[in-house]
């Protein structure tokens, strides 16, 4: 919805180039979208890293129990 709002403001800004209020709203929307996208990318990377580490711990634990059973 943020991207849609940004797009609508862009269309309005292009249609009425002299409207300072629309231009300011568009700039604010651009900043908001930039912040939200950057935070989403960071959160995705963190969650992916946690999942990989969790999977690695489970794999290591299962391998250690298998190797102790063979001895």
Image (spheres, rainbow, N blue to C red):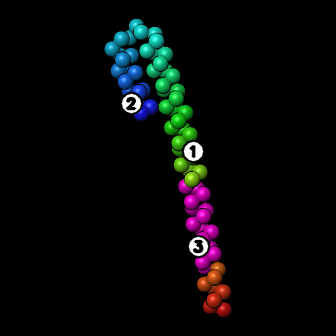
Q: Is residue 58 magenta?
A: yes
Identity of the residue drawn at 56% across and 40% down = 39
Q: Quickly name the residue at label 2.
A: 4
User: Magenta-highlighted stretch: main secondary structure?
Assistant: helix
Percent across and percent down for residue 20 are: 46, 10
How many C-alpha atoms fall within 10 Å of the one at disc 2: few (<14), some, or many (≥20)?
few
How many C-alpha atoms fall within 10 Å of the one at disc 3: few (<14), some, or many (≥20)?
few
Percent across and percent down for residue 14 are: 35, 16
Cα distance in 3D space between marks 1 and 2: 22 Å
Percent across and percent down for residue 3 are: 42, 32
Residue 22: quarter of image: top left
Percent across and percent down for residue 37 are: 51, 38
Q: Quickly name the residue at label 1.
A: 42
**Which residue is situated farthest in the left direction here?**
15
Q: Is residue 62 magenta?
A: yes
How many C-alpha atoms fall within 10 Å of the one at disc 1: few (<14), some, or many (≥20)?
few
Identity of the residue drawn at 66% across and 86% down = 68
Cα distance in 3D space between marks 3 and 1: 26 Å
Q: Quadrant of the N terminus?
A: top left
Q: Give the vertical position of 62 relative to 34 (above or below).
A: below
Return the disc, 3 or 1, that comes first in the chain's sequence: 1
**Which residue is situated farthest in the top direction here?**
18
Q: Which residues are magenta?
A: 48-63
Q: Nearer the viewer, mark 1 or mark 2?
A: 2
Q: Are marks 3 and 1 in contact (CB under 8 Å)?
A: no
Return the disc, 1 or 2, that comes first in the chain's sequence: 2
- Residue 59: image tag: 3
Q: Quadrant of the C terminus?
A: bottom right
Element on which disc 2 rests: helix
Identity of the residue drawn at 52% across and 29% down = 32
Q: Is residue 31 left or right of residue 61?
A: left
């Amino acid at each position: 919805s943020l991207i849609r709002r940004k797009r609508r403001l862009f269309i309005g800004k292009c249609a009425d180039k002299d409207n300072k209020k629309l231009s300011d709203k568009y700039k604010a929307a651009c900043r908001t979208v930039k912040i939200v996208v950057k935070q989403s990318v960071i959160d995705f990377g963190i969650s992916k890293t946690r999942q990989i580490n969790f999977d690695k711990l489970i794999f290591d634990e299962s391998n250690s129990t298998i190797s102790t059973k063979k001895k």
